[in-house]
Image (spheres, helix red, strand yellow):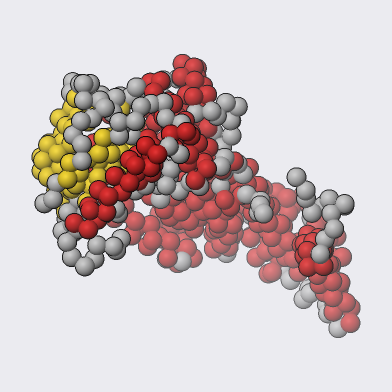
Amino acid sequence: MIQEKVTRKSASSESPMLLSLRNVGKAFSNGVTALSKVDLAIREGDFLSLLGPSGCGKSTALRLIAGLSTPTSGQLDWRGSIDRSNIGFVFQEPTLLPWASVFDNVWLPLRLKGVSRARAEPAVMEMLSRVHLNGFENAVPRELSGGMKMRVSIARAMVTKPRILLMDEPFAALDEITRFKLNNDLLELWQDERFTVVFVTHSVFESVFLSNRVVVMAARPGRVFGELAVDAPYPRDEAFRTSPDYAALCRQASDVLVNAINSTAGPHHDDH
Amino acid sequence: MTTIEDAALKLDPEEARRVRQERLERIGKWVLPLAIMVLAIWLWDRICVWNEIPQYILPRPGVVLQTLHDDAGLLSSSLLVTLKITFLSLLLAVIGGVGLAVLFAQSKWVEMSFFPFAIVLQVTPIVAIFPLINIYINNQTTKLLLCAWIVAFFPILSNTTLGLNSVDRNLRDLFKLNGATRWQQLRYLRLPAAMPYFLGGLKIAGGLSLIGAVVAEFVAGAQGQSSGLASRIIEAGYRLNAPRLFAALILISLTGILIFLVLSLVSHLILRRWHESALKQER
């Protein structure tokens, strides 16, 4: 297996370890090896992107971290005790309850923990204003645009103040302008709260813009191919998006990704 | 924002034609069926007159209307009996159908084991089962209720089961992630998700419970045991009292239409904010 380490030094290498995946593998009963021998160390406060082509197991990795699925081999070591309430999850689709108001959707995780509407209200309203949805608490999802639905989804994931936020290609279905705006707002939220993010994406540009670590994965079997440290300082804004530094970093990440795609054996490397 | 109603807006011929078409369709939706109905009644009346058909074979519409008025006491007490059976059986069908669906939803094994029985109940004609029910049950109302229930509960059961099982996978994961209990998952996710399916089943069951009630009365009424509208029809048939027969028939039809309209309204009110089926087309 080709291992390409572009840079080992990570912007957060001083922070304590939050989770390490050691030699993790996942095989399905239909014979597909979704993940093979994955080693990954996630540090407290990381914004880590999993970047790779379809079928590289990045979503599977996310589900393993969330505890929605168990590994076939290897293990996940959390630092300290972590239960599911410490994990926030944002799906590829907004995945809202269509019959419930925006407020009720954000309240849901707290409600499931037995928090009454009245006691949940300050936290819910604060989260809604953090994602710039003030005044929309009584709307139902179908009255919102795609970007706004995704904001509700993020607010719902963050309302329990999780230590780690897992995001599975959350902005893939949005148009570019909306995506840029949500990228900026997500970074702002992350800088204020300093939670840990694992962000699955197949966009080189998005991963470089957002994260301090880009982990590139390759397919068949799904594995970690290489890692790129994005040392550019935060806050990152529109100026960063057009800077030569950003372009250079994107180029590096893109090269690693191309190598990862080419490393996939067999003639089927571009199918999905 | 500009709308097509905007008078200042200049419309091209194609758009104008479409707007005119839409307006015509809106009016026609109400006027056409009414006009056809009036025409049919007028034709009915004329046929009676032209062919000099005796009243005991085909009464004129006016006579039927007169009978509705004259026999109001008798017919309305019969209508009440039929309505009681219809609504009680619909209520029991909702309780039974939803209850069984929730039970089925608890485990695939329960569903696999018991669903075939529900199908057997559904496909066996009620008229064929009635003699058995007649032997086992003495109470007249219970007998009729059971018949109507057997006819009506299946669409609710099968639709609600389908609804409870068609929850978005990601939403299910979300609930799992947040440590939702089985009850919470049912209460906050599966039951609301099943609501549109349930309401679809309810609309069918509403009509079926009336049919079930009338059919049960027919079978029971043949033995002189019932006092509902169906027994009025049988009785009127024996006596060649065609006007009353028609009057009872009209009352049954009206009841069916009313049940359908009420249930459609209920369905619309519950779903109007979120479900595709209840949304106005937006362009």
Q: Tell me: residue B135, above or below residue A83.
A: below
Q: Tell me: residue B190, above or below residue B216.
A: above
Q: Is residue A150 visible?
A: no
Left or right: where does residue B184 sit relative to residue B89? left
Please name the residue shown 50% across and 47% down the image: A175
Q: Position of residue A163 (x, y in %)?
A: 30, 24
Q: Is residue B16 visible?
A: yes
Q: Position of residue A13 (x, y in %)?
A: 21, 25
Q: Is the C terminus of chain A in the top left, top right, bottom left or bottom right quadrant?
A: bottom left
Please name the residue shown 54% across and 53% down the image: B200
Q: Tell me: residue A97, above or below residue A54.
A: above
Please name the residue shown 85% across and 58% down the image: B10
Left or right: where does residue B7 sit relative to residue A147? right
**Residue A80 placement: quadrant:** top left
Marks counted in the figure total 0
Q: Tell me: residue B280, above or below residue A12.
A: below
Left or right: where does residue B8 sit relative to residue A13? right
In front of the other: A134 or B151: A134
- In this view, the residue farthest toward the front is A244
Please name the residue shown 20% across and 30% down the image: A9
Q: Position of residue A219 (x, y in %)?
A: 22, 54
In front of the other: A238 or A99: A238
In front of the other: A84 or B53: A84
Left or right: where does residue A270 sit relative to residue A76? right
Q: Position of residue A189 (x, y in %)?
A: 42, 25
